[in-house]
Image (tube, rainbow, N blue to C red):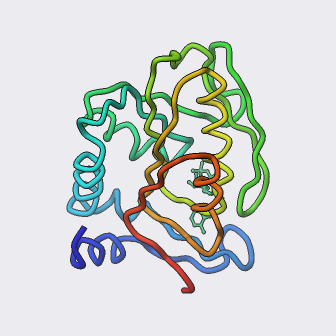
Amino acid sequence: MTESDIALLKNAVHTIENYPKEGIMFRDVMGILENNAAFSLTIESLKKKFENQGFTKVVGTEARGFLFGAPLALELGVGFVPVRKPGKLPRATYAQDYELEYGTDTLEIHQDALVADDKVLIVDDLLATGGTIEATTKLIRRVGAEATDAAFIISLPDLGGESKLADLGLAVTTLIQYEGE
Ligand SMILES: O=P(O)(O)OC[C@H]1O[C@H](OP(=O)(O)OP(=O)(O)O)[C@H](O)[C@@H]1O
Ligand SMILES: Nc1ncnc2[nH]cnc12
């Protein structure tokens, strides 16, 4: 990513103060989807980074992880597996509780969506505390598959997600960062 690539993505992301709760600076990734140049740069950058590395599945988390994970899976020529909020997946699931920057929740994965030989790339729009992707990693490993890498469009390094995911043995890729702002 060049300086102008970073500027293109940052210009597309809107910041909304005190949403969805007082004190939260919400970084709205939807602006990237609305801008074809920003969206294609995002998917192309992640494709370049992760192609030809033996990944067999992309896992994306509800809801915004679907928007980037599914097109990246198509580009990489692999399947996409959703990790969803409770009660949304119709087949047998595993469930994992987690904490968010602004609340707690549970995530689920289909028990049969991955096999032990799968090498999984995790994709989400944004890394904050890392709770969502910690829970996602536990779900992938519970199925027996390998989770080595997690990719995000945005990271908020002040919230500590990078070190939480490094402690889990994940390599973390982020395209743009908002630190101390
Ligand atoms: O690193 P963390 O502290 O876990 O936070 C990041 C997560 O929070 C947001 O999702 P949210 O749970 O708000 O769901 P949504 O995409 O359905 O709005 C975001 O899309 C990430 O998935
Ligand atoms: N500050 C933030 N902006 C957008 N999405 C988020 N998810 C968790 N924290 C967030």
Say which of 160 and 153 sits in front: 160
Residue 136, relative to residue 150: is it above or below? above
Ligand 1 falls in which quarter? Answer: bottom right
Residue 117 image point, x, y percent:
46, 17
Residue 179, relative to residue 112: is it above or below? below
Say which of 147 and 131 sits in front: 147
Q: Give the residue drawn at x 27%, y 73%.
A: 8
Q: Give the residue drawn at x 52%, y 70%.
A: 27
Say which of 166 and 157 sits in front: 166
The answer to which image quadrant residue 181 occupies is bottom right
Say which of 129 and 32 sits in front: 129
Residue 88 image point, x, y percent:
64, 27
In the visual, does 160 lie left or right of 58?
A: right
Residue 59, relative to residue 132: is it above or below? above
The number of numbered badges drawn on the structure is: 0
Q: Give the residue drawn at x 29%, y 78%.
A: 7
Residue 17 image point, x, y percent:
61, 80
